[in-house]
Amino acid sequence: MNCNKFEELLSAYQDNSLSPDEKKTFTDHMKLCSDCEAITEEVDHIKAILPELNRDVPFFLKNRLYLIGESDEEQAPVRNYAYLKWVAAGIGTMVLFLNLFYFTNIFPAANKTLHTAVAGVENFVVEAEAFIGRIKESNNLFIFKKTEVITKANKKKRDAKAKRKTIRGFKYG
Amino acid sequence: MLIDKYSRTVYNLAFNFCGCSDDANDLTQDIFIKIYKNIDKFDESFNISSWIIRISKNHCIDYWRKNKKNNFRIDLEDNLVRDENSPEDNLIKSGDLNKLREKILKLKPEVRSLLILRDIQNHSYQEIADSLNIPLGTVKSKINRARIQLAKLYEDR
């Protein structure tokens, strides 16, 4: 047995899991090789003192850990809105490019399309305003004359109410 | 509760892995935050202890790679032994433990974690193999090599 093989079997020897033959070869080598004997003793020593490195969890840390557990139980699931920043960035970039194409002529096709689109929107707004103006003038639609319509519909009811008030006025006034 | 049962394992792994109590406190806290965040993903057919050990070990190694690769230190104050022996004995013992801790930090992170789990925390080889998803034979040979390497480093003190 050489020293490399000895080192390979060291833990198995210490765990007492070598076969009788291997064990004999191992101990024979240890008797002959002082380096391997020293290593074995050192490993034994280390194995004996390593458990002493174990220590208790500091009190304050344990309390902090309990707080993690509690806060986790109480917390509602957090929604992830990280994608919103990408949406905002996308919109920003789009607006930037639209401005660029609208106010400059670096890309004529886009410039023409944008101006056509803006002109279309402007026309639409003007026509819509004119339409609303016409409706207001016609004075017929209940959304603008709601109170009047209601008044007409309930005229009878209102008259009756007014009559009752007048009678009460005489009675208690 | 998870904290009562596993805080000692996690803390000792972190403490012996980085050698400094301040870092160990932060690491332990981070590991438990990670555990709570991922508890929904835990497959209940597996052993929770193995899962926690695996998370702790990976987190310690990540931390080491990010922060401590070239800049490790140990707190001597953290390792003072205060037991029933005489103050002189305690001082010698503290010196030995400090030396040992310092040498442990010189081991590669992977084998260091294995050694801590086996020889400091007394987990079985099988438990370690299951936790870290490594073949049993590999765990045994790595721990054997780690012990010999540590013994040689310790001998050179």
Image: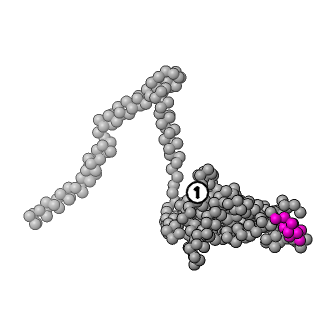
The structure's colour scheme is one colour
- Could you say where residue A1 lies in the image, as x and y percent from the top left? 89, 63
Q: Badge 1 local density, few (<14 within 10 Å), some, or many (20+)?
A: few
Q: Name the residue under label 1.
A: B73
**Closer to us: A51 or A115:** A51
State the residue lying farthest toward the right: A21
The answer to which quarter of the image holds residue A158 is bottom left
Q: Could you tell whether A79 is left or right of A164 in the image?
A: right
- Could you say where residue B74 lies in the image, as x and y percent from the top left? 58, 59
Decide if residue A16 is in sight here. yes
* Residue name at image x 47 percent, y 22 percent: A104
Classified by dominant secondary structure, the portion drawn in magenta counts as: helix
* Residue name at image x 20 percent, y 55 percent: A159
Q: Which amino acid does label 1 sit on?
A: Arg
- B157 up-or-down from A84: above or below: below
- Could you say where residue A4 lies in the image, as x and y percent from the top left? 84, 59
* Residue name at image x 58 percent, y 66 percent: B79
**Closer to us: B131 or A127:** B131
* Residue name at image x 62 percent, y 58 percent: B60
**Closer to us: A57 or A53:** A53
The answer to if A32 sits in the magenta stretch is: yes
Q: Could you tell whether A128 is left or right of A61 in the image?
A: left
The residue segment tinted magenta is: A24-34
Q: Could you tell whether B148 is left or right of A165 in the image?
A: right
- B21 up-or-down from A105: above or below: below
Describe the element under mark 1 as helix, strand or loop.
loop
- Could you say where residue A109 lies in the image, as x and y percent from the top left? 53, 23
For the C terminus of chain A, which image quadrant? Answer: bottom left
Decide if residue B135 is in sight here. no
State the residue lying farthest toward the bottom: B84
